[in-house]
Structures are given as structure tokens and as C-alpha cells.
Amino acid sequence: MWWKFLKVSATFTQKQLEIMEAAVKLFAGKGFDNTSVRDIAKAADVNVAMISYYFGSKEKLLEAIFIKYVTTMRGKLEEIVFAHDVTPAEKIDRIIETYIDTIADNRHFHLLMVREQGVMKNKVMYDGVKSLKLKNTSLIKSAIKAGAKAGIFKKNVDITILALTVFGTINQAFNTQRFLCEQYRIDPDNEAEFLKVIIPRLKIHLKAVVRSYLLVSDK
Amino acid sequence: MWWKFLKVSATFTQKQLEIMEAAVKLFAGKGFDNTSVRDIAKAADVNVAMISYYFGSKEKLLEAIFIKYVTTMRGKLEEIVFAHDVTPAEKIDRIIETYIDTIADNRHFHLLMVREQGVMKNKVMYDGVKSLKLKNTSLIKSAIKAGAKAGIFKKNVDITILALTVFGTINQAFNTQRFLCEQYRIDPDNEAEFLKVIIPRLKIHLKAVVRSYLLVSDK
DNA sequence: TAAAAATTCAAACACTTGTTTAATTTTCTG
DNA sequence: CAGAAAATTAAACAAGTGTTTGAATTTTTA
């Protein structure tokens, strides 16, 4: 089926999904360039030729991974919009919590994205990441505007820069996982333990930081 | 001179420094794996064999770059310690400003470090990065403790997590340079303009965020 | 159930990679 | 200035890369 990967749709067969899942873990762990198609084939338990057969090329496989995860994460973010009848402060809290949970769920892909975005030449992927960032920023923006209108948040906040803090903090946490494990005396191979320790701390900290920054000082 | 790169000292010849400077820019722009020794040789205007000749290998060249910059940056941070007779809040401000200035000055290396730290197997480099992080954390820690003792800062702050925010924000800014240029309508190739716009904003924002987070609420 | 289509496979392909070699040129030294 | 040391070079090297091939196998279809 030489016509399968005409990127007409973003749905994938079971075999494709298996290869993608094996690949994203390897890419996240060793980097895209340091992972060979033979590594992927071995991890996914298929023949090397299957990668070209199913995706066209190694680069297109990466593209497929990006399409899948960007779609997933955008979907998760959409859900936040439909959270009504909560205070602006609560909405900010929920946004932050959803961010952290979603990124943690897809941390392999997210690590890959963060690492690869700086050297990204591929337009499909660059645009995918950009659309995610814009969605994120606009989400925060609307929540802050609501709070500003209610008079409890500062006005004239540079949301682009605030977004740097929110995502920078989360990215830094997952990107320095090994270092953090040392700091908190966690076995670096015990991922579950790492998540158990870091996620609550991250949530509490980030919510406190953003809150104290946004709230109008009542001195 | 086959004995040159016995890593007995961290001083480099002029030729070595030229190669390292060319290499760090290429590594930052395209990634370590995506940069070939022939690319480096061309950029530094030397023969390919010179890289092995002067450094032993491409990996050792990266190591040399790490040694040089880690030493540089550690030196810059030392200076902060010698800033006496300032209030704790001012000291925090100075730390943040020095961080941002130092990272901006060495942004090519810093990008490389952030990108490569996740996939780093090399002990020399990993330890170098770790020592920088520990230095950073201990710097912030002592400044915060002074403020806490003076009663103007919160007590019991998780400084490891706070450091995630400080460095995560800065890293995110430089790692998403292209995206930020789009947001602020800056020509993506005009690095000077990018720095002129982003550095002041980054400083103001980060100081405000950390300050509002650390200051004891006087409600 | 037999022909057709889709999948799987080992092998080969062309190419790039980092490194080494050995000859040559340049620089240093006594 | 002559000889040694150091630096530079083009060419060759082995190893690994992503991809393609064409035959074999499995699955689907009619």
C-alpha cells in the first residue's frame, strides 16, 4: 500500500501506532538523530523496511508523531474552555493543573518537542508547535482578561512573557528529571515516584507564583 | 603534538578557541548530532583532521566547550557573592539580572547545554552542568535565607522548585526565540533587536514574579 | 479456493559519518 | 642554516546511516 501515507487523514493503523509509540520513547530518551531506524524497528519488533513502508521516511515518522500528539494536546486544552461558572482565579488554577497533567501524560513527546523545536526546519512540525503555543497563550489571555475585568487581576500583563514562566517551569522540570531525582533522593529509574513527587509540588508552586503575580496588591 | 589534549589544564590555544567558537555556534543552531566535523572545519576554516588533532575527537571538542563555558559562567556567578550592603530584595534582583545577562552573553552555549543535557551520557559534561545548577541554587538559597531572617521573605520556600521557574523562564525565552520574534514582530535574523526587546522584559517580569512570590503577604 | 493485494523480510544500496594515515609544508630551535 | 618538531593537507578508511529492492509470505477478495 504505497498510497497509505498521503497525509490525507491523521488516523493511523494499529501497526503505525505501535511504531510511533516505540519511536517517541526512543526519540525522547536519545534524541531524534541519535536514534536509528534499526533501533526503532527493534523496539517495535518490526522489520526496518516497515518504517519507510508505513511512513515514507524517518522524518515523516516524526511528522506523524507530531501530528498525533499536537492533535491530542490541543483536544485536552479545548476542554478547559468549557469550564464555566468558576472564578477567574479558579480558572487559572485549572488551566495550570490541566497543563501539567497533560504534559505529564505525554511527557515523552513533550520532551522531544522541547528539545527539537530549536532546531526544527520542518514546516508541518513548526506550525504544529506554534499553533499549540498560540492556543495556550490565548487560553491564559482570556482567563486573565476575565479576572482583570472583575478587578481582581492586574491589568496590562504581558501574557507572552507570563507564558514563558508557566511553560518554562514545566519544561525545566521534565527536562532536568535526572537532576531533580538526585535532589529529592529519588531513584532516577523510578519514573512513577518522580511523577508522584514532582507533579504536586509543581502544581502548588506554579499556582502560587502565578496567583501572587496576577493578584492586585492590596497594600 | 599528540599530547596536547591530555586535559591537564583548561587553557586553550588560539586555534583551539577559534574551532570551539565556530563549533558552539553550529551546535547551538543545528544540534550536536546534526553538525558534522566537516561543517565545523569549514566554518573555522581549517582541515577536518584538525579537530581530531587538537581535541582528540568530536565528543572531546564538545567536552572542551563545556569546560570553557562552565568555568566562565561559574566565574560570573562568583561575583554576585561579593555584593554586600544591599537589601535581600535587591540581592535577589541582582542575581536575576546577572543570570539573564550572563546567559544572554553565552546564549549559544547555553542553548546547546539546555538541549543536550537531557540526552547527556558524558560524565564530565553532566557533572559540569550539575555543579552550575548547584551553585545557582545555593546562591538563591542564601539570598532568600537572609531575607527570611529579616522577616521580609516567606520561610520554607522550596528553592529547588523556585529555581525551575527562574531558569525555566530564561531557557524558554532563548529556546523559543523564533516564536517570540514572530510575537513581537521582530525580524528573526536580527539577534540584536531580539535581545534589546526580550532582555528588559525578561528582567522586569522575572523580578516581579519572584518578588511577589517571596514577599510575605501583608493582608 | 484461487487470484490479487498487502505485508514482511533479508540483503543490498548509496551515502555520510568520525577518524586515521602518510606525505608535505610550516615553524621552531640550537 | 640545517635539522627537528609541529602543523596542515588530501586521501583513504571502516562503520553506521536511511532507504530501496525483489522475492517470500500472509491476508483479503471475489
Image (cartoon, coloured by chain):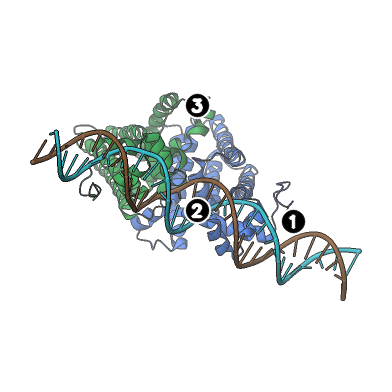
Chain colours: A green, B blue, C cyan, D brown
| Chain ID at mark 2 | B
The quadrant the C terminus of chain A occupies is top left
Q: Secondary structure at mark 3?
A: loop
Q: Is residue A217 visible?
A: no
Q: Which x, y percent locates residue B5?
A: 70, 50
Q: Of the residues shown, which amino acid type is indicated by label 1?
A: Met
Residues behind callouts 1 and 2 on a single chain: yes
**Marks 1 and 3, the one that precedes in the sequence:** 1
Disc 1: CA contacts within 10 A as few (<14), some (14-19) or many (>=20): few
Horizontally, residue B112 falls left or right of residue A97, namely right
Judge by depth and name the residue closer to the eye, A154 or A125.
A125
Q: Which residue is mark 1?
A: B1
**Marks 1 and 2, the one that precedes in the sequence:** 1
Q: Which x, y percent locates residue D7?
A: 70, 63
Q: Which residue is mark 3?
A: B156
Q: Which x, y percent locates residue A171?
A: 42, 39
Q: Which x, y percent locates residue A30?
A: 47, 40
Q: Secondary structure at mark 1?
A: loop
Q: Of the residues shown, which amino acid type is indicated by label 2?
A: Ala
- State the image quarter where residue A70 is shown: top left
Disc 2: CA contacts within 10 A as few (<14), some (14-19) or many (>=20): many
Q: CA distance from mark 2 to mark 3?
A: 37 Å
Q: CA distance from mark 1 to mark 2?
A: 29 Å
Q: Which residue is mark 2?
A: B28
Q: Of the residues shown, which amino acid type is indicated by label 3?
A: Asn
Mark 1 vs 2: CB contact within 8 A = no
| Chain ID at mark 3 | B
Residues behind callouts 1 and 3 on a single chain: yes
